[in-house]
Structures are given as C-alpha cells and as structure tokens.
Image (cartoon, rainbow, N blue to C red):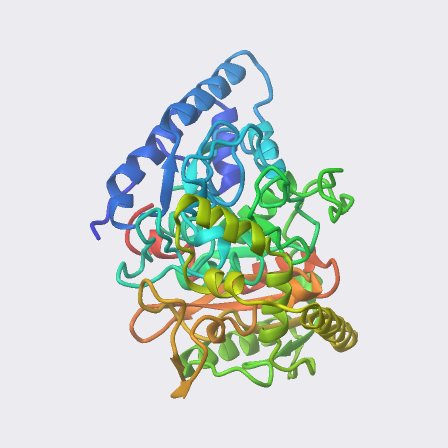
Amino acid sequence: MTSNTASSSTPGSGLASIAQAVRAGQVSATSLAEESLRRISELDPSLHAFCTLDEAGALAAAKRIDQRIAQGEDAGPLAGVPVAVKDLICTRQLRTTFGSRLYKDHVPDEDDVVVERLRAAGAVIIGKTNTSEFGYGAFGHNALFPTTRNPWNTELTPGGSSAGSGAAVAANLVPLAIGSDGGGSIRAPAALCGIYGIKPSMGRVPAYPGCRDERYPGISSWESLEHIGPLTRTVADAALAMSVLAGPTPKDRFSLPSEVGQWTVRPPETLRGARIAFSPDLGFAAVDPEVRALTQAAALRLGHALGATVELAHPDIGNYAAAFEALVAMDTDREGLRRMAEQHGVQLEGWLASLVGREWTADEFTRAIFERKRIVNATWRFMEGYDFLLTPTTASAAFALNVPGPDVIDGKQVEAGSAWLAFSALGNLTGAPAASVPVGLTHDGRPVGLQIMGGHLDDLGVLALSGAMEALLPGEWPTVACRRGWI
C-alpha cells in the first residue's frame, strides 16, 4: 500500500490536541473533515473499512462547528474530531445495515445514545464502518459489502466484528472509531490491527437503540453481553472518548451512574504494588507460540517497571465456549430472522445460520445461565487476590480473509470460529472492563495484543495499567499509521 502523509495543516494526532486546535481556530473542523475524506478516498479502496460514507453530512456538521467557534461558542471536548461509527450502531438519516442484506436500505430515524453524545461533544461523523452480519463473527466480511482488510497486510483480516473501525483507526482514516463488543469485537480488531481498544464495564456506555429495539424484527439484542466502546491510537484518546460516551440513560436498563466527569489516565506511580495475574492460556486454550512469548514478556516487563507482583494464575473456569454460544442464541430472535430471510429470499450464512437453524431447548439455555453464574463466581473470587488479570487478547495474530479463524493453532486442530477468541468473552460474561494493548509484532510483522482485565467496575484501573504498558513500548505506538508514514 502506498504511504502518504497528512497535510501540514493537520494538528497533533491526539484527540485533545485536535479539538483544542479547532477551538483555538488554528485549524478548521471543515479542513479536518476534508482531510479525513481525502485519505478515505485514497486508501480505503484497498481496505474497505467504510461501508457507508456521509461526505455531505460530515462537511455540513463541520461547517456548523466552525460557525459556532466563530461566534464564540464552546464547540465541545471533541470539537471537529472525525469519527467513524460501526454499522451495528444507529445513525439518524444515515444508512445502518447491521451488515445484512435484510437491512440493506435501512435508514434509522434516531441516533444511538453514543452517537447523540458524540455529536453533542462536537465530533464529526464521517461514516459507518463494516462489520460481520449482525456482529455474528469476529471478522469483517458479509454478503453486502467488500471484505474489510488489515492495514498491516491487506491479505489478512483485521478481526472483528468491529472490523472497519479497527482498520480505519490503524490506517489513520479517523483518529477515533466506535465499536461494539459482545465477545471480543472491540478487543480482537484492536489486537490484530495494533491499536488500542477498550470494552468498558457492562453498562458504562449505554446501548440504544442499536440492535435492542422492537422496531427491528429479527435482530439479536445480545443485551446481557454487548458493550460499546472506543478504538483509538492511544490510551489517553480512549479516556477522552469515555468522558463523552459514559453515563446513564433510561433508555438502557443496564446503564451505570457516572463515577467521574473527566476520564483520565492515572500515572503509573498509582499502580505501585499492584497484584497482577498473567495466564497465557486460561488453562485450556491453544495459543500461538509467538503470541504467548510476546504477551508474557510484556506482562513481566510491566510488573518489573511497576514494582508489582506478576503471578502465573487464572480463575478455574474451563472452556466456556458452549455456554457462551447458548447465551448468544438465547438473545437472538431466531424465529424472526428465519421469517425475514424467507420473505426476502436471503440465505443466512456462517455462525448466524447455524444458530438460527438449530433447535435449541429451554434446558440448554438454563444450563448456560447457570454456567455463567459459576464463571462469574469463580472470577470474582479469583480477583479478590488480584487487581488485574492479563492474557493474550487473541490466541493467534491476524489470519487469512473470509474465514472465521484459524483451524490450527500451535499445531493443534481447533474450532476455527471460537478457539482464537478463547480469552475475550470472559469479560462479557462477567461484565468486567477489559482492553487490548499492542505489545509487539510476530516475526512476519503481525501485531499482537495483551488483554488487560480489571476488577468489577475498575475501568480507570484498566486505563491506568494500559497507559503504563503504552509508556514502556513507545516504539510500538501509535501503530502502523506512524510506521508507514501515514501520519
């Protein structure tokens, strides 16, 4: 892919720097939107991060921000920041397909809560990013749009299901993208694309309407599993985004009260003596040797820098893939999807098709609910002895396009769609905050992420430890965009 630097008028890449420059009149929101759109026009034909662009809407929004600043008004903490939004998240008057032919022409009449908050904060919505159909699969292909590709190697997947969001940030098409995560869909693309992604605590960032509204028949809610969060190039950028996104709303019954107004990354000194557990496999996962080595080295280096204890340990949870799949199926309107697919003459594919086509029993769902309770209990008991649990984010680095995952890891035959995601769904089952931090590259140049999971509601702790890891590896940040001269 041809490298290309941004224009000289572009301010520093950090969200705070961008917004401050816009508020100070050093750069216009309009020029930033134009620059983002130019880069998308030049680079995205080979990446397919975006499935729907809103050029006219973005430029109009940017112009309004510039007018507000000219009139002496406060344009918000994200003034002029170009933002991409995953195509599972509703955007008013902007096509939202959920990655499915069943909704290929769907235009919502209201914004998701997070989109409302982004607009109110002065962000400029550039467009929608590609995802798997309804988010069923940690990859970026569906039957509606071209397959999303990884900026590090366009023959490989960026992961998913927030595939386009991960690729867009890694390639510096936008400095901030919003993703959703029902089992790793923020953290997996963050790991495979070499960027930062955080799945906040359950309810920290509200989700509505998204896939949770009765007006959208046939759509899964994933209500007890789904989280919304930011993908960025730095931890500080994610913290600023959380300042805008977090907070309660009556539209989401899981939403939490605000604990802080301005989210910040606490300095590493506050983590002195932290109790850290590291597990390379959670006791059951097949893990690529390079992934294992890079993440373990990063964990030990982090502990040494902080004067913290790092122990090889993990909660006694076992392989929870079957229980997770049953919970997803329980949250899926299987009858509605079958009916819609028949009415539209659409053939559902992949994991979604298998979930919808299978006849599940109430007993299977009950067993999954009780298994989840066991896992939650085992995890909180384990975390009483530790402040953080570190693991690889994924069991494998990026793999080939148009497959659900590798079927062989570390020489072992594995389930392609789930084995490489062995670590991520624990955070969804428990609701605990978890993030992926880039910690290095494999011998052939594929990014590897370290997952940092915190205790109950300790989002600020996860951000702090992420920041400490970021500071130890300055050569790896801010990722491919910098390495290839794209910023």
* In this view, 227 is above or below 396: above
* In this view, 42 is above or below 70: below
Q: Nearer the viewer, residue 31 or 160?
A: 160
Residue 60 in the image: state x and y as whole percent.
43, 20
* In this view, 49 is above or below 392: above
Residue 25 in the image: state x and y as whole percent.
46, 22
Q: Is residue 325 left or right of residue 58?
A: right
Q: Nearer the viewer, residue 331 or 195?
A: 331
Q: Is residue 27 visible?
A: no
Q: Nearer the viewer, residue 109 or 312?
A: 109
Q: Nearer the viewer, residue 49 or 35?
A: 49
Quadrant occupied by the C terminus: top left
Q: Residue at coordinates 54% horizontally, 67% vertically from top-left?
A: 358
Q: Residue at coordinates 56% horizontally, 29% vertically from top-left?
A: 119
Residue 280 occupies quadrant: bottom right
Residue 148 in the image: state x and y as whole percent.
34, 53
Q: Is residue 364 visible?
A: yes
Q: Is residue 320 left or right of residue 30?
A: right
Q: Residue at coordinates 20% horizontally, 50% vertically from top-left?
A: 2
Q: Residue furthest bottom?
A: 411
